[in-house]
Image: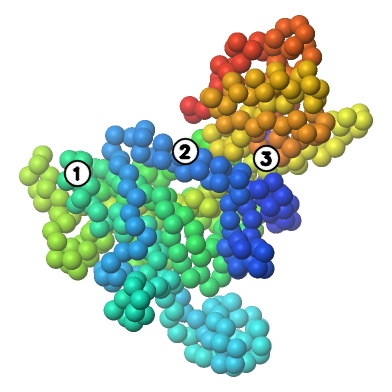
């Protein structure tokens, strides 16, 4: 199975992502825009599969969750109430000559000089990380809005709407996937830290006093989600935040960290946000956001457990964890390096490749028939360019778990095809009439 990767392997992954159409630098024809990325034809499938797997696990397979898709633009008071207008900031120094800004802890040997032009620096000042824009034609402070820095607030401001519409009882949660924006000062490491990214967030509302127990339950569930989808447990760890690291709203927080090639770093945070957000919104909006518990006949503001993950970070971790370069037998009897993504079949952008042994006109119609049959059930790709060995390698490189090969025996003798397994490279012969069932069974999509 895949080895643990080093920083040097990242170049190979970034290059594979570009070459095979997973991830491209954004607006590349203009020289790109720093740390922004576009998901190509395979990347968009992989990312959708990550989101679908999350949605299925946290919404469809649970009785205590509902979904939401709130707007990116929100009333500016939201960010005053949430504390982001005041506290979502990094201390930065500014160069008096070139006006670039730097974090004081990133200045290197001479902390008084600009690392870019050598100019003198201002004293540190707080710079808010929220991206600003204006609604309507007038660009003044009355029309200023923010691109949301987290999706969470869309959930808090809809808490009462969802409770009333769904008649839910606590404990219950709301899940949302969507874009968030932060004017990060030090973006980098490919898609790990960017200024535009997608979050998958849950706000799980519980009775105060039961919050610690739910915090532990969510931590366990979320860790399990990553391992169920193939991340090796050795590459995951849980790290509890020290009191001085906690966000302004949190009573406690655990990170699920992944062992990226540059070191351990956060994949997802699971915080106990207490009743901070609902209480703040109640105060600032004047609306009653308390919950009436008709079993205990009590009114209270619920506490909130928040598992908050990044779609882009999870997608990157799945790519890195599944990447491997293996020695494999070559056509000339020697060995060659086989690049393979051991992606979980639920995540693989293509589930089945249909490959005629060659472009021989007797094989192609049968292979197209197989392709038409399989694509009705599974995400499928047809490929007849170049040798069969090269086509297997191409599919290995994009993580396609199974390949179906149509050969002369298929059309002349047995109406059966060969299924080749990406990970073991073993091949089995299967009759056409049982092919779809055999593929579905091998893909184990229900896990
Ligand atoms: N609502 C809580 C919250 O936003 P966070 O730890 O700041 O907490 C949650 O962000 C997750 O969002 C992170 O664990 C990470 O996966 C993702 N994330 C945060 N900032 C990001 C960035 N600049 N680029 C990519 N993903 C980011």
Give the Cα distance between marks 2 and 3. 19 Å
Residue position for label 3: 398
Q: Quadrant of residue 276?
A: bottom left
Q: Farthest residue in the left direction?
A: 297
Colour theme: rainbow
Q: Is residue 45 left or right of residue 108?
A: left
Ligand 1 has an atom within 8 Å of the beta carbon of the residue at disc 1? no
Q: Is residue 124 left or right of residue 252?
A: right
Circle number at residue 165: 1
* CB-based contact (under 8 Å), mark 2 and mark 3: no
Place of residue 340 in the rendered image (x, y in percent of width and height, measured from the top left): 71, 38
Residue position for label 2: 53
Place of residue 194 in the rendered image (x, y in percent of width and height, measured from the top left): 54, 63
The mark that comes first in sequence, 2 or 3, is: 2
Q: Farthest residue in the top direction?
A: 413
Q: Quadrant of residue 158?
A: bottom left
Give the Cα distance between marks 1 and 3. 43 Å
Q: Residue at x 75, y 30 (%)?
A: 384
Please tell me which residue lies in front, 207 or 81. 81
* Rendered position, 86 above or below 269: below
The mark that comes first in sequence, 1 or 3, is: 1
Place of residue 187 in the rendered image (x, y in percent of width and height, measured from the top left): 56, 67
Which type of secondary structure does the marked residue at label 1 adopt? Answer: helix
Ligand 1 has an atom within 8 Å of the beta carbon of the residue at disc 2? no
Classify mark 1: residues with Cα within 10 Å, few (<14), some (14-19) or many (20+).
few
Q: Quick one: quadrant of the N terminus?
A: top right
* Rendered position, 153 above or below 98: above
Q: Residue at x 88, y 30 (%)?
A: 331
């Amino acid at each position: 199975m895949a080895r643990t990767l080093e920083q040097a392997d990242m170049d190979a992954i970034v290059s594979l992502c570009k070459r095979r159409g997973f991830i491209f630098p954004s607006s590349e024809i203009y020289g790109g825009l720093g740390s922004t990325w576009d998901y190509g034809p395979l990347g968009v499938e992989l990312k959708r599969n990550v989101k679908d797997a999350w949605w299925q696990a946290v919404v469809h397979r649970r009785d205590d969750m509902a979904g939401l898709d709130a707007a990116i633009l929100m009333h500016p008071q939201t960010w005053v109430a949430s504390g982001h207008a005041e506290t979502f900031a990094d201390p930065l120094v500014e160069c008096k000559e070139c006006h670039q800004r730097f974090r004081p802890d990133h200045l290197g040997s001479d902390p008084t000089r600009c690392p870019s032009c050598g100019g003198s620096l201002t004293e540190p000042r707080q710079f808010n990380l929220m991206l600003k824009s204006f609604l309507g034609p007038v660009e003044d402070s009355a029309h200023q809005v923010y691109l949301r820095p987290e999706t969470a607030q869309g959930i808090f401001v809809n808490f009462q709407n969802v409770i009333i519409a769904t008649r839910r009882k606590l404990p219950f949660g709301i899940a949302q996937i969507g874009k968030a924006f932060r004017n990060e000062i030090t973006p980098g490491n490919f898609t790990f830290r960017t200024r535009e990214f997608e979050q998958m967030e849950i706000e799980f509302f519980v009775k105060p006093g039961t919050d610690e127990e739910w915090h532990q339950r969510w931590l366990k569930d979320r860790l399990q989600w990553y391992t169920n989808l193939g991340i090796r447990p050795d590459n995951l760890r849980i790290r509890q935040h020290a009191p001085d690291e906690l966000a302004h709203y949190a009573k406690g927080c655990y990170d699920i960290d992944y062992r990226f090639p540059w070191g351990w770093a956060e994949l997802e945070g699971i915080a106990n946000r207490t009743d901070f957000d609902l209480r703040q919104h109640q105060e600032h909006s004047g609306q009653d956001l308390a919950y009436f518990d008709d079993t205990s006949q009590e009114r209270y503001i619920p506490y909130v457990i928040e598992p908050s993950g990044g779609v882009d970070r999870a997608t990157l971790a799945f790519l890195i964890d599944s990447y491997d370069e293996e020695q494999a037998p070559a056509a000339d009897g020697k060995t060659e390096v086989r690049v393979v993504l051991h992606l979980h079949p639920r995540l693989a952008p293509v589930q089945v490749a249909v490959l005629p042994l060659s472009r021989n006109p007797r094989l192609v119609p049968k292979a197209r028939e197989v392709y038409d049959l399989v694509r009705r059930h599974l995400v499928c790709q047809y490929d007849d360019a170049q040798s069969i060995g090269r086509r297997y390698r191409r599919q290995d490189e994009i993580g396609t778990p199974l390949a179906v090969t149509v050969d002369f025996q298929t059309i002349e003798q047995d109406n059966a095809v060969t299924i080749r397994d990406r990970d073991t490279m073993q091949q089995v012969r299967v009759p056409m009439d049982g092919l779809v069932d055999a593929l579905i069974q091998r893909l184990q999509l229900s896990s």
